[in-house]
Image (spheres, rainbow, N blue to C red):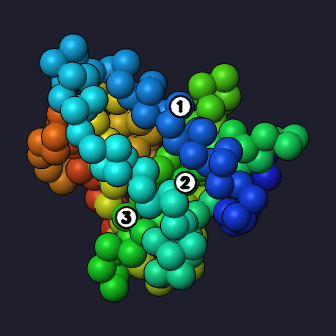
Amino acid sequence: MLKIRRYQKKDNKAVKELHHAGNMQMGEMLTEAELKELISLPTATFGSDLDDIEGVYLKSGGDFLVGVEGRKIVVIGAIRKYTDTCGELKRLRVRRDYQRKGLGETMMRKLVTRARELGYKELILDTIAENRPARRLFEKLGFSELRRERKGPFNLVIYGKNLNEEGK
């Protein structure tokens, strides 16, 4: 049974491992040229926020949640303050052996609820264009494509959601 709770310092190693595994899985979606460009980027480009989850998320108007089954962290997700009225969803990752079981959707719904509790009126997030399962999930939950942009080797799709709308 999945239990979602707030991140604790003792979770950091497992969170970083899950994040890294998710990055590796996303790398599988890239072309060879994109992968070479990705490898050339400085390591700090990816995941340096995980070295200071308390400062980046917990003490800065956001939150960082972990989903635990048994004693394993199997899903993570975070909200970071983007503006006073807009939060940014970050670091949604599901362990590969737990994917396609609804855990990503459960975490997303919890993050949307938490963003409302934090007073945000809207949310934004991004994903690589090639990540069709994530894009389907975001659209199912009422996120709309705002724009596309290129960042390093990534073709990103930027999504937004008005939290004042009823429903999803």
Q: Taking the image as drawn, is residue 147 in sight? A: yes
Judge left or right: residue 50 versus residue 14: left
Secondary structure state at the residue bearing disc 1: helix
On the image, the x and y values in percent for residue 137 come to: 44, 39
Judge left or right: residue 131 versus residue 74: left
- Residue visible at 30% across and 79% down? 83
Q: Residues within 10 Å of mark 3 (few under 14, many from 20)?
A: many
Circle 2 residue: 77
Secondary structure state at the residue bearing disc 3: strand
Quarter of the figure that contains the N terminus: top right
Question: Relative to residue 58, is residue 148 depicted above or below?
Answer: above
On the image, the x and y values in percent for residue 5 come to: 73, 62
Q: Residues within 10 Å of mark 2 (few under 14, many from 20)?
A: many
Quadrant in the rendering for residue 87: bottom left
Between residues 165 and 49, which one lies in front from this camera angle? Answer: 49
Between residues 5 and 43, which one lies in front from this camera angle? Answer: 43
Q: Amino acid at mark 2?
A: Gly
- Mark 3 or mark 1: which is in front? 1
Q: Amino acid at mark 1?
A: Ala
Circle 3 residue: 88
Q: Residues within 10 Å of mark 1 (few under 14, many from 20)?
A: some
- Mark 1 or mark 2: which is in front? 1
Whether the residues at callouts 3 and 1 have beta carbons within 8 Å, the answer is no
Between residues 78 and 44, which one lies in front from this camera angle? Answer: 44
